[in-house]
Image (cartoon, coloured by chain):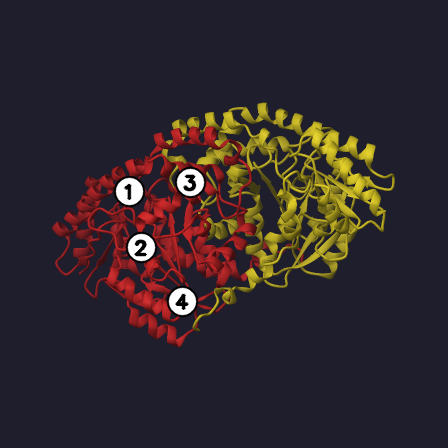
Chain colours: A red, B yellow
Amino acid sequence: MKNQNFNQLRSKAVRKIEKSAIVEILRVINQPGMISLAGGLPAPETFPTKIIEKLASLVIKKYGSLAFQYGPTEGLKPLREALVSFLKEKGVETTFENIGIVSGSQQFLDLIARVFINPSDYIAVEAPTYIGAVDAFSPYQPKFLEIKTDKEGILPSDLEKKLKQKKVKFLYLVSTFQNPTGRTMSEKRRKEVAKVIKKFNLLTIEDDPYGSLRYFGKSPLPLQVFAPKQTVYLSTFSKILSPGLRIGFYVAPKEVFRLINIAKQTVDLHTNSFSQLIAAEYLLTGDFKNHLPKIIEIYKKRQEAMLEALEKYFPKDFSWTKPEGGMFIWVEGPKNFDSVKTYWQAVEKKVAYVPGCYFFVKQGQGKNTFRLNFTNVSEEKISEAIKRLSEVIKKNI
Amino acid sequence: MKNQNFNQLRSKAVRKIEKSAIVEILRVINQPGMISLAGGLPAPETFPTKIIEKLASLVIKKYGSLAFQYGPTEGLKPLREALVSFLKEKGVETTFENIGIVSGSQQFLDLIARVFINPSDYIAVEAPTYIGAVDAFSPYQPKFLEIKTDKEGILPSDLEKKLKQKKVKFLYLVSTFQNPTGRTMSEKRRKEVAKVIKKFNLLTIEDDPYGSLRYFGKSPLPLQVFAPKQTVYLSTFSKILSPGLRIGFYVAPKEVFRLINIAKQTVDLHTNSFSQLIAAEYLLTGDFKNHLPKIIEIYKKRQEAMLEALEKYFPKDFSWTKPEGGMFIWVEGPKNFDSVKTYWQAVEKKVAYVPGCYFFVKQGQGKNTFRLNFTNVSEEKISEAIKRLSEVIKKNI
């Protein structure tokens, strides 16, 4: 026992997540002069700091010690109530009892895994899928089943096939402006997927962090609307107010709601009360409705700049998604294109992106794809970055 | 698969924590007219709401978007740096690199368990111990080893004996004004315990939420000072600023620090940035030093009122701790006294406490003991509650 290394005492859960290849590859993005299209950060200029300052005072006057005392695990009632109408406008009909508050939607992803996953249980994810969710699930040592996708989201036929083969604990997907592809499931597809979900009574996590960031077109109804007894609708204030406040929220079937709360109780007791009430007042005062168009105006221009630059500079055998909102564009090169190899040449030219392979759970996929973020860089820099990137790419094909 | 109940899909981790007897017993404490000495809440009148309002504005002006953007998992540098001198005054010498920020100290308890516990691993705790820690560790399915305690804390001889018998992943204890007993380990005892910790290179979590709430006497040096390579020092802003802000902090050996951060990354990315910076400025502006005496003034009087009432009303064969600070007093009755049976009679008379048995990991202990909290009730009510309780007790012995 003497001189033992604490590292040797690690649990299996932590060994499982020790090495993240993507952390390695992204280590270079803070180099001076780098234009990073790799991240997924909101632009700091979208944060309504003046509004938050006003709301902080308002919250202290209106709620007093409620903002600073221990609170209920499921969240403070003023925020849960304010979310009822927010959700109704998205098409999700519910009451405050079914709305829970979490310390960022990332926490929900950890909790749902904690509640349901025993080692070697199957969970189903999109191919490609959101890395943060895979990272949240992995410590619980599940096996991942990839469900094939096309331009409209997961394929109902492939989902059904996989569900017949394996007992799946839950399905996780991002329904609108998906991370990494930017794609949105059509309403028709949502109905078809909901049919399979209902047939197999499959617990489904519909993650919707980007839905409010719509620059064109009309929002489809959430998947949750078509299978409410099986689907958790999960969202966040990170993209419409501030990620630093760490406020996520979800609507869940009653039993799932109860189990998430039991788990959350021992994990962090409850979410920051002061920030919950700031988020509540952001909705109640109308500040959200006034401020959202300003965020959209900034991002819409940046997305246009990126699409224009891609059109102008990229080789003809490359294609990319043209999302009606969100934060990401997904680029697909010809079959022989290697986005990891190109990555290292791109960072030499001071441009970074995320190679597509990192968004697949099973290795050997997405070799010719990559993800671009357009929210946290100015139009000029976006244009310059895409130009530089196109030059690197042209040398490689 | 059809019509399956999601409840049946629960993981072992969640099954483990489903039923909490203490939740059942405390369900009644919100009845009208109840004087509850059962909780562990700070008094809302101790929250420096005016100061927080001022600091919220200051943080926005001084730090801008840093307060609202995604932040590093280990915490924001201004808070970690401000904590260096806060900790130095307690005797803990460290640099900001070794200080981590968590979403309340409860989160640290979950993370340390996640990092180190595989099912059936042994961890050592005091008898009696803090329930919240047991609740945090239990989902990871450890076996608990109870270490015997006396008035000065855990017995080094018993610790050594248990360490020789079993391979223990870590030891958890509350060194000052312990929850539930209010007891403080003497400095002499700390040195003796540290000797055992070093001999066995035993990872130790020293939880110190109450140390700043000292009403008399002089603080002993933290246990961490005597075994810094093995000991994590854990504390919180919950008792000196506000629990609703959910800001905990810890000093850990380098390897442990690294592993905690790997685990925290997937669990909630990072702790609320805005509140971290408010906590930083609370220390940096001197507001903490001005405000702490006001908190102490309130609690000291309440503790005096409780000790006076116990002296005045309680039977001679009852004894209780007389802590120099903290939030709790621990009462011990004669051997035949049954604090659970008495509890139900007490709540009929509208007084609540926590029966002592709930603070032991192994059943059948502490039958004749109970915990009283004095921080969240006025002096008059404390006196009245102790009087009522003494009447109930006298009927039972």
Which kind of residue does numbered mark 2 sit on? Asn
- Residue linked to disc 4: A202
- Give the mark, 2 or 3, whose residue is nearer the N terminus: 2
Q: Secondary structure at mark 1?
A: loop
Report x, y in % for residue A75: 48, 45
Does the CB distance between marks 1 and 2 fall below 8 Å? Answer: no
Which kind of residue does numbered mark 1 sit on? Asn
Report x, y in % for residue B218: 72, 30
- Residue linked to disc 2: A179
Same chain, marks 1 and 2? yes
- Residue linked to disc 3: A245
Which kind of residue does numbered mark 3 sit on? Leu
As measured in the structure, the alpha-carbon distance from the residue carrying label 2 to the one carrying label 4 is 22 Å
Which quadrant holds the C terminus of chain A? bottom left
Chain label for disc 4: A
Q: Nearer the viewer, mark 1 or mark 2?
A: 2
- Give the mark, 1 or 2, whose residue is nearer the N terminus: 2
